[in-house]
Image (tube, rainbow, N blue to C red):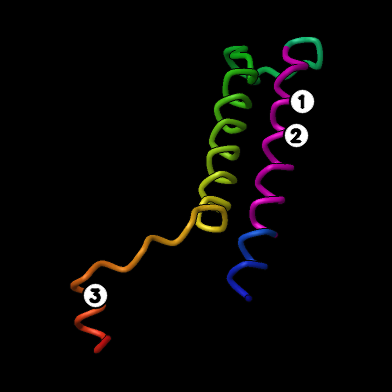
Amino acid sequence: MTDVLARLVGTVAAAVAAVALFAKGGCGTECGEVTGTIAIVHTPFYYALGVSMAICSLLLVYPLIRRPAAPDADERRDSGE
């Protein structure tokens, strides 16, 4: 039960972070989001981090939504069934 709760909280946190990163990245140069020395726009970095957080969110929730596989015959034999 604790694993489920931790995965759900982590999934929500990662999803919120992904949405915030996409929103912040969408502003781009209009918000002055460039590096101080050579004026590289931050937008692609925000989008890359947003994609990474979205993938992290999916990886956290995946074990909760997949169906458990049926035990193999070897596993049933080893457990004494």
Give the Cα separation between the discs numbered 3 and 1: 48 Å
| Dot 1 amino acid type | Ala
* Residue at image coords 52%, 50%: 62
Q: Is residue 13 above or below residue 70?
A: above
User: Residue 18 occupies which quadrant of the picture?
Assistant: top right
20 in magenta: yes
The answer to whether marks 1 and 2 mark residues whose Cβ atoms lie closer than 8 Å is yes
Mark 2 and 3 residues: CB-CB less than 8 Å, in contact?
Answer: no
Residue 20, numbered circle: 2
Residue tagged 3:
75
Q: Nearer the viewer, residue 28 or 26?
A: 26
> Residue visible at 58% across and 52% down?
61
Q: Nearer the viewer, mark 3 or mark 1?
A: 3
Residue designated by label 1: 23
- Asked if residue 72 is positioned above or below residue 80 in the image, the reply reads above
Q: Which residues are magenta?
A: 9-28
Residue 45 colored in magenta in the image: no
Q: Amino acid at mark 2?
A: Ala
Query: Mark 3 packing: few (<14 Cα in 10 Å), some, or many (20+)?
Result: few
SS category of the residue bearing label 2: helix
Depicted 23 relative to depicted 56: above or below: above
Q: Pick the residue in front: 31 or 2.
A: 2
* Image coordinates for residue 58, horizontal then vertical, percent: 56, 44
Circle 2 packing at 10 Å, graded few (<14), some (14-19), many (20+), is some
